[in-house]
Amino acid sequence: MRFLPAIDALLSSPTAKQLSAEVGLNKLTVMARQTVEILRNELRQDLNGEFSKKSLLHKAETMLRQKFEATKLQRFQRVINATGVVIHTNLGRAPLSDASKQAVFKIASGYCTLEYDLGTGKRGRRGQQAEKLLCELTGAESALIVNNCAAATFLVLSAFGAGGEAIVSRGELVEIGGDFRVPDVMAQSGTRLVEVGTTNRTKVKDFADAITENTKLLVRVHPSNFRIVGFTAMPNILELAELARAQNILLYEDAGSGALNDLSGIGLMNEPVIEHSIKAGADVVTFSGDKLLGSVQAGIIVGRSEVVEKLRKHPLYRALRVSKMCYAALAATLESYQRGKQFDEIPVLQMLSQTKDEIRRRAENFIEKSQEFKFCNFKFGLLDGTSAVGGGSAPLAQLPTALISLESDKFSVVEIEEHLRSSSPPVIARVADNKVLLDLRTISTSEINEILLVLQQIESNQSTAI
């Protein structure tokens, strides 16, 4: 134990001096204390080992660097998504367009006209530009933006359903990621849930028969992350709108993923188009900003003016509203739609619209380019496969793609995946059929060279270790 390095000695070592610039002295001191304590415990388990002051200091330096590398993996950082899951919830869902990134950097990173009217020199309305664009693109009279779609749902139910009843089909009582359940949200909002119909079949008459003097809302929920197929029936939005108007009841649709265009042409069937819901007569519609819309996390509310303006004045709105960063990025995304350039400028739509032949050509170019790196430990192949939309959107959609298989005589599949995940930048790959697979649908052109450099670094590190 007398050979254990002192904390000051470890902090004065070449390794610690190198790490100090990255983590700072305070954090490094904490890590050094933890390292020495771990080393002390190890020595207690190895009482017969032979050690010297020099060898223990060297071991402590190695452990300190390992702790630093483990800490790096826990940082919030950029990754390369090679999984082929376009709207990958664990990886941040929709990547931002160049215009959105520039808007955040140039406009929202400093002082901006968040709530200031340049024309009058007085206080302006928060999020006015993004809301105006939403109205123009959906045909709604008014719009409001909160921090996610769950918040939008909670706000609508709290404002219009509290103390009353909301009728919803049993087939739409969904649970999405993170144990978020529609019935639970209704209960928290003070709205009493009235279930009608059956799991697979619900009719307009079921809604009509359930209406009482306590009914505040008819609710339609898009089952984003699952589908019931076969002997099924659900009333369409037009039928529900006619019933709601006849009974003077509010019709609310939670549209989920939030498509502003009909995406059936690229294989995404049955995703509700917000404009169609508004035209059909929905009083208020909510949807996500970071799914099929292709922007930042946001809960978007559109509908009739008197409905949306009541939500704007509700006390909950202030707790749920978004920051200037969100308004800037969202407005820039919506401007791409307004110009008709969404499929050229918004990454999610670009990825979803890529054909299998286009991806195959890119994959062939990737494999050809890999030959320039003269890899000794990696072999590349080309396979047919499918990509996923992700984010609970279009669960039945199978997007044909071409996959690059990555194999090695030196590394196991588990080791390849781990090396990629631990690299800089981390590359998140897919593992299937005992192969590591890269799907270029979710890999940008600029990231291809980065992946090849990562593989080169993995080989280099292995050679150094040997």
Image (tube, rainbow, N blue to C red):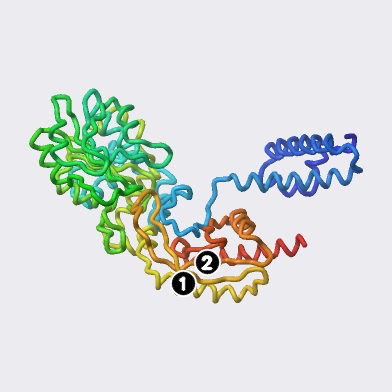
Q: What amino acid is at disc 1?
A: Arg
Packing grade of label 1 (10 A; few <14, some 14-19, many >=20) is some
Vertical arrangement, residue 339 with respect to residue 219, above or below: below
Q: Quadrant of the C terminus?
A: bottom right
Q: Is residue 128 visible?
A: no
Q: Quadrant of the N terminus?
A: top right
Q: Residue at x 42, y 60 (%)?
A: 387
Front-lying residue, 213 or 19: 213
Identify the mark at residue 448; answer none if there is no mark.
2
Packing grade of label 2 (10 A; few <14, some 14-19, many >=20) is some
Q: In which quadrant of the rendered view does residue 341 lie?
A: bottom left
Q: Residue at x 10, y 37 (%)?
A: 245
- Spatial CA distance of label 1 from label 2 is 10 Å
Q: Are marks 1 and 2 in contact (CB under 8 Å)?
A: yes
- The image shows residue 8 at horizontal and vertical percentages of 81, 37
Tell which circle, 1 or 2, labels the residue nearer the N-terminal end: 1
Vertical arrangement, residue 414 with respect to residue 157, above or below: below
Identify the mark at residue 362; answer none if there is no mark.
1
Q: What amino acid is at disc 2?
A: Ile
- SS for tag 1? helix
Q: Which residue, as the protein is rendered here, is positioned at the far top?
A: 163
- The image shows residue 158 at horizontal and vertical percentages of 27, 29
